[in-house]
Amino acid sequence: MDEFLIKLSYRYVSKKCKLTWQEIIFAIQCNIFTPYSAVEHGVSLLLADEEYSGSLCELASLSEEESLLNNGSMVYPLVDDLIASEEKQRLDFIRSKWLYLTLLWVYENKDRYNDPLEIVDEVYADFDYPRSIEAFVTYMYSDESDIENKERTTNHLYEKWSMYLQNQSKIFDGTSGD
């Protein structure tokens, strides 16, 4: 699986939506999350007093150093056990959720980048060119009337990006993909 450009923190994502183990393992495999994010998720579930298994307890007890050893080799079998208890999710749903979360983070932190729209272009490539965001990818923009006016074009791309995030938030905010 490809390594993605943007790295997100579990803390940030967990404030935006609920996650399943399938979504967490996808993020770890794509390097959006580190393996320690699975440990953080396990701890949050234990603290929430939810039902838990031996695998969850074992995962939540790992230190950050242990979780990162051998590229997360201690984390993967435990998360695989936890995934087995979940209803299977569609990969396209999981990818769409991470696309949304990544673009949301970039949008909320656009002041950190010289050209946030260039980051959108890179995210577009990282996620294998999803049609859902073509409207605000700079080199896909096709309104001939705005080509001469860079500021108007940029504003239009930001508006499209904002509309995408608003629409996706209705799907993903507070969801776990069930």
Image (cartoon, grey):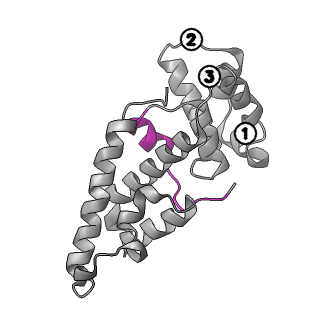
Please, what secondary structure does the residue beneath circle 2 have?
A: loop
In space, the residues marked 1 and 2 are separated at their CA atoms by: 24 Å
Q: Nearer the viewer, residue 155 or 59?
A: 155
Q: Is residue 16 magenta?
A: yes
Q: Is residue 82 magenta?
A: no
In space, the residues marked 1 and 3 are separated at their CA atoms by: 25 Å
Q: Which mark is residue 66?
A: 1
Q: Residues within 10 Å of mark 3 (few under 14, many from 20)?
A: few
Read off the magenta span. 2-17
Residue at the far bottom: name it.
148
Q: Which mark is residue 86?
A: 3
Q: Residue at x 38, y 74 (%)?
A: 138
Q: Residues within 10 Å of mark 1 (few under 14, many from 20)?
A: some
Q: Position of residue 172 (x, y in %)?
A: 40, 37
In front of the other: label 1 or label 3?
3
In front of the other: label 1 or label 2?
2
In front of the other: label 2 or label 3?
3
Q: Position of residue 99 (x, y in %)?
A: 47, 51
Q: Amino acid at mark 2?
A: Glu
Disc 2 designates what residue?
51
CB of mark 1 within 8 Å of CB of mark 3? no
First of labels 2, 3 by sequence position: 2
Q: Position of residue 111 (x, y in %)?
A: 31, 66
Please, what secondary structure does the residue beneath circle 3 have?
A: loop
Q: Which mark is residue 80?
A: none
